[in-house]
Image (cartoon, rainbow, N blue to C red):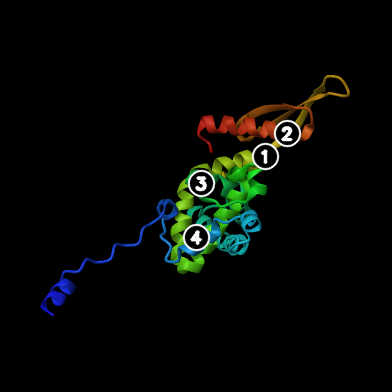
């Protein structure tokens, strides 16, 4: 009896369950996202592309979570821009939101976080670009936000959103300028209360009829001018705006 009691008192505790490589990988991803999931199955679902489900016939894919994450990100992005760009009007804020919530923006954030390394995809996606496909990365990024909402509500998605913005905030204005230089130049004029908005004039069209080159001049406050060239007037106008933005940036006007 005494021997049994001593064996019971000094018995070894059972070893902790082993963690596989996937567990360690997801823990690293959680650190990058700024949030540790209570139910890691939700995170795993967010990282599962429809092609994986089709190939394996197992589990659920990330499409429903993507739907939820898209709505959540729209709200958080609007709140973020409202608080960080207090002097901008609705039009500018709407364009910023469109830029930050675009598929290309989400894919860019996903790449910077390294999300692709954790995606589960099927053969159809593997044959056509694999985990580097922009659509897969963007969908998974939105789905991760949806999963965070299901796992921890608003505090969880705020943590993930803040991590996302650390990767994206430095390019948001640049991206806006590159996506729509003509619109961005007009926004500068409105923000600085210039007396006149940018004026565009066709300078000339040269070259053969089947392959012309158009030159368009843009004039803004202070007598500044810039000329853009292109095979079409529309693109020449955009190029003129882009060159004027470079002039303004050099002067520190932006």
- Label 2 packing within 10 angstroms: few (<14), some (14-19), many (20+): many
The residue wearing badge 4 is 43
The residue located at (74%, 33%) in the rendering is 235
Residue located at (51% from left, 46% from top): 117
Label 1 or label 3, whichever lies nearer to me, is 3
Which badge, 1 or 2, is on the more N-terminal residue? 1
* Label 3: element kind: helix
| Distance Cα–Cα, label 1 vs label 3 | 37 Å
Disc 1 vs disc 3: Cβ atoms closer than 8 Å? no
Residue 182 or 27: which is nearer the viewer?
A: 27
- Tell me how far mark 3 sits from mark 4, CA to CA: 14 Å
Q: Position of residue 52 (x, y in %)?
A: 61, 55
Task: Classify 166 as above or below 142.
Answer: above
Q: Where residue 250 sits in the image (x, y, percent)?
A: 52, 29
At horizontal 70% and vertical 35% (from top left) the residue drawn is 238
| Above or below: residue 146 compared with residue 166 | below
Quadrant occupied by the N terminus: bottom left
Counting residues from the start of the chain, the first of labels 1 and 3 encountered is: 3
Question: Residue at left 66%, top 28%?
Answer: 226
Between circles 4 and 2, the one closer to the viewer is 4
Image coordinates for residue 201, horizontal then vertical, percent: 76, 31
> Which residue bears the numbered disc 3?
117
Mark 3 surroundings within 10 Å by alpha-carbon count, few (fewer than 14), some (14 through 19), many (20 or more): some
Asked which secondary structure carries label 2, the reply is helix
Q: Return the residue found at the far left.
A: 2
Are the two marked residues, 1 and 2, in contact with CB atoms closer than 8 angstroms? yes
Residue at the spot of label 2: 237
- Cα gap from disc 1 to disc 2, whole angstroms: 8 Å
* Residue picked out by circle 1: 182
Q: Identify the mark nearer the N-term, 4 or 2.
A: 4
Looking at the rendered structure, the secondary structure element under dot 4 is helix
Secondary structure of the residue carrying tag 1 is: helix
């Amino acid at each position: 009896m005494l021997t049994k009691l001593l064996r019971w008192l000094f018995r070894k505790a059972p070893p902790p369950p082993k963690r596989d490589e996937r567990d360690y990988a997801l823990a690293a991803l959680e650190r990058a996202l700024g949030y540790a999931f209570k139910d890691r199955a939700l995170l795993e679902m967010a990282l599962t592309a429809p092609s994986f489900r089709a190939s394996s016939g197992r589990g659920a894919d990330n499409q429903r979570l993507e739907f939820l994450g898209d709505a959540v990100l729209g709200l958080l992005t609007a709140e973020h821009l409202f608080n960080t760009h207090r002097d901008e009007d609705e039009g500018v804020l709407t364009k910023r939101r469109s830029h930050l919530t675009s598929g290309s923006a989400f894919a860019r954030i996903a790449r910077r976080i390294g999300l692709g390394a954790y995606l589960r995809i099927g053969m159809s996606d593997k044959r056509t670009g694999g985990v580097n496909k922009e659509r897969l990365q963007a969908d998974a990024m939105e789905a991760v936000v949806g999963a965070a909402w299901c796992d921890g509500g608003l505090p969880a998605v705020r943590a993930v959103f803040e991590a996302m913005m650390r990767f994206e905030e430095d390019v948001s204005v640049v991206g806006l300028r590159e996506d729509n230089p003509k619109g961005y130049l007009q926004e500068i004029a409105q923000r600085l209360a210039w007396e006149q908005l940018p004026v565009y004039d066709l300078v000339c069209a040269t070259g053969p009829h089947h392959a012309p080159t158009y030159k368009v001049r843009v004039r803004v406050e202070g007598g500044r001018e810039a000329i853009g060239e292109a095979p079409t007037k529309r693109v020449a106008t955009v190029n003129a705006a882009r060159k004027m933005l470079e002039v303004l940036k050099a002067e520190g006007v932006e």
